[in-house]
Amino acid sequence: MATEGNKKIIAVCQSGGEFETNKDGTLSYRGGQAHALDIDDRVKFEDFKVEVAEMFSCYMNSMSVKYLLPGNKKTLITISNDKDLKRMVKFCGDSVTVDVYVVAEEIVALNVSDMLSARFSAACGVDHCLDHVDYSKPNLSCFITDTEIQSEFAHHDLGVARMNNGSFGCCPASVIRAARRWQLRFLRQPDHFYYHELQQGLLESRTVIKHLINAEDVDEITVVDNATTAVAIVLQHTAWAFSEGIYDKGDAVLMLHYAYGAVKKSIKAYVSRTGGHVIEVPFNFPVNSNDEIVSEFRKALGKGKANGRKVRLALIDHVTSMPSVVIPVKDLVKICREEGVEQVLVDAAHGVGCVDVDVQEIGADFCTSSLHKWFFCPPSVAFLHCRKKHLDLHHPIVSHEYGNGLPIESGWVGTRDYSPLLVVPSALDFINRFEGGIQGIKKRNHDNVVEIGKMLAEAWGTNLGCPPDMCASMIMVGLPAGLGIAREKDALKLKTHLRKNFGVEVPIYFKDPEDGEGEGESITGYARISHQVYNKIGDYHKYRDAVSQLVSDGFTCACLPD
Amino acid sequence: MDGGDEDQTKKKSRPINSIISWTEIREEFSHHHPSVARLNNGSFGCCPASVLAAHRSFHLRFLRHPDAFNLHSLPFALLRSRTLLKHLIHADHLDEIALVDNATTAAALVLHHISQNANAAASFVVVVLHCAFQAVKKSLHAYVTRAGGSVFEIQLPFPVRSRREIIAEFRKGLKRAKSLNLNGGKIRLAIIDHITSMPSFLIPVRELVEICRKEGVEQVFVDAAHALGTVPVDVKEIGADFYVSNLHKWFFCPPSVAVLYSRRSKNAPLPIESSMWTGTKRDYSAQLLVPAVMEFVNRFEGGIEGIMKRNHENVVEMGKMLAESWGTNLGSPPDMCASMIMVGLPSRLLRTHLRECFGVEVPIYHHPATATATATATARDGNDGESRPPRPWDKEDGVITGYARISHQVYNTVDDYHKFRDAIYKLLQEGKVCKQNAFEFDPMS
């Protein structure tokens, strides 16, 4: 790091140990690891931090760098910029070495738990008592440790750098055990389970969800298998309205161009077939700002309302899947209301645990989110929130409870394994072991994934798919053009190649090169990186190095067999 | 692979010393509540420990690396299950075999499909048995009635006397449906149970499907929720367009999985693969267990056929024992039942009471009191018309208005049924009866 001719010093960087105050008030550092790094007074602080972060495999965001002045061993001096670093080199002048301490920052626990417990006690008159669900502030002194996190996810394949939480989510061992307990209760005495345990268990799950998303009433919450089912419930209602003449043929249903594949198929099957006109809202990717999305949305609404038609339903993703971008749903729902859209459904499949899902704030008629993607439930479970006035909906699978209201109907759709739907309270228990609960997890995931995205883009000489504030726990990072991702199939093949040969799991999005971008190489592949509590920075270094190696080897997708 | 799987389904008895022992059977079902006489396999089925272990193993493999599992392991495992099932039910083509969650889901799929493809202008008629499963009847309301179609219910007599009677009644009912002349007398779909739920008896389904064809019914859907593992199934012989059977009832799978057969035809196929309701990011583990189940059943003498045969013989024997003890009758002749049989109860009794106070789990069918019921009450008690010793409760209630549906599965012992017999004795001696309105609607059958 140091260059010739400048004042040099060896920084002995230490981390993982503890400070002790001696009898004379001076500080001593014990334990942890130490690495030596030679620096001079010209070194940039950013570069210094990058080196140190890599040394200790920690995140720059949560890192704090301090040192003790010679002659004053009582006060730790924080280094936060180039000037501070320069001063340190100057002050430690004649020494050969300087002790530098790398400390993990305390993350301020946000007051979410307080909010939840306040709401819970206010609603207690209406809700059932949930003795075992602890809404109180997590005990600050016993947060889950790193070792415990690793053991909760010990069932993950340790040889795979798993950076695709967005697709299948993850489930910690303690929640898997909770699910098994439910399964055993059914197997032990299924009739008794059906008559005396199932409904109460589902009600507890629904109550947890109600608090999570700030819904008014637990009657508005229905648990289902997944967001696809939830969307089908709403679309079925729309389809009947078209069939029965309540909606005119040619009235519009809006969806984003980047809506989830299965949902798009559903919309075509339910809506187009019954006479509705489906309009897709495109937007550019890479995307630069919310305004781009908002203006396209307005345009599409205009199309839908042309010739005196009505827009009956707008289906808006909260976080699109591929490519993944956080959509300004609140703004779009507001526009829908202004423009007289009849109903709005927010598909927040990547919702709870990834972005803030507050149904009062979002203001839609319907909102759905998965709980097995970012809320630590096993596959698969999701919920549909419906405002009270929209309760005349039905689950597509009709069983004994038909006609008793959607939440009750969904509580029995034939004999099946309901355990994923029953472990929502257990998942919340797991989450509350983390500092800051779900808010803390979200914040750390976001900060980390942004840092990682920038690191990768810089290493590969590419760019991000959107600005940092338009992503949550996932980020799109351009892959080097030299890899030659020329079509969708290449993206799949490359993903498999990386999995098999480098042990990295990352989905790749193929972006069609725009017209007129014939000169030079354009970025046609974007990796969707996820960050979840079980990830380590090493995972992403592995990915970075794998791709860099492919590039330096002259690899292109054309080399891969079909 | 094909030949190997076929062998697996046809495997008969093994050498005597490798047949599963009673101790091993008890171990396999040691997770069952020990003090409950579980006479209701028909509702929720059962799953042995070794199949549960295979279930967990698949589940963990998925959780370990879901992307890799779904891409590289899942398709092959699904294919194995489907191939074994194709052989088991004697289907011609693999693409006729789909795995869904349960029979209720299959009914929704078929009815949704029918209502979509029906000509919107013409009304269409769907025929169903009066004793069809509740969930199916509600599905008809949600998909058929709502879309402007009509539902016609065919009454079948109960207690059942003979196959001939059922066939005759069905034929009469179908003709009546046609004579209503909705949709020009054409019937869009007939839904026929293979084994009815409540009350439970075996339907001569092949004959009924033939009648449907003769009468010009467009498509036939056989709801065979209870079939696989209780009766031999040959879908080609039965000749229906759609046939569904649960695997978690009598085929030892955990909840839940069912096999849905759709005969290749010129009609638009059922859109199961792109089913809009189930999503793909789900737990497929239960669907992958057919090979593990075959391994389990092949530890029994005679494999699945041996199990079916013994369940049938035992349930008939137990049914007769109970009917004789209580002075009542069976709901059908022995050859019109499989692994479940209806046994008349002396008077109305609460199911919950039996569960909570006596540790007996058995579903009860409340049969409207009719002259027929009274007449047959004394006719069929297995004593060939000899007068039987009077019971203390005879004079109070000679009309059978309740039937218990008892099941027999490999984990059952004679003691389970004795427990039930004695519980009823006790209740009668204590003079416990149900009030008129207190009968409990029992959807779980």
Image (cartoon, rainbow, N blue to C red):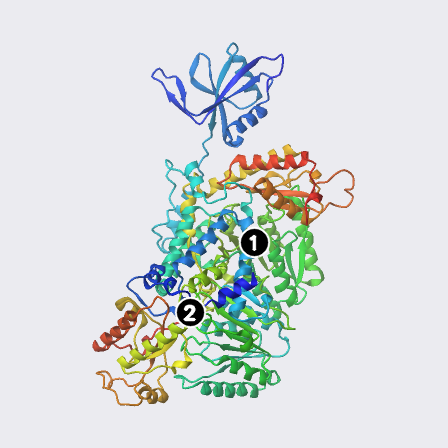
Characterize the local packing of mark 1: few (<14), some (14-19) or many (20 or more) Cα atoms within 10 angstroms. many
Query: Where residue B181 sits: x, y (%)?
Result: 59, 86
The answer to whether residue A495 is left or right of residue B305 is: right
Q: Chain of mark 2?
A: B
In the foreground, A114 or A178: A178
Please tell me whether mark 2 sits on a helix, a strand or a loop.
loop
Report the residue marked by disc 1.
A347
Query: Where residue A168 sits: x, y (%)?
Result: 53, 49
The image quarter containing residue B313 is: bottom left
Q: Chain of mark 1?
A: A
In the foreground, A221 or B127: B127
Report the residue marked by disc 2.
B302
CA distance for labels 1 and 2: 52 Å
Residue A350 appears anywhere in the view:
no
The image quarter containing residue A201 is: bottom left
Please tell me if label 1 and label 2 are on a single chain.
Answer: no
Location of the N terminus of chain A (image quadrant): top right
Question: Up-down: is A285 above or below B47?
Answer: above
The image quarter containing residue B389 is: bottom left
Query: Where residue A411 sits: x, y (%)?
Result: 44, 62
Tag 1 and tag 2, C-beta contact below 8 Å: no
Residue A512 appears anywhere in the view:
yes
Question: Up-down: is A502 above or below A85?
Answer: below
Please tell me whether mark 1 sits on a helix, a strand or a loop.
strand
Amino acid carrying label 2: it is: Gly
- Seen at 26% across and 77% down, the residue is B433
Query: Where residue A303 sits: x, y (%)?
Result: 70, 57
Question: Up-down: is B25 above or below A3?
Answer: below
Question: Up-down: is B295 above or below B138?
Answer: above
- Seen at 63% across and 64% down, the residue is A269
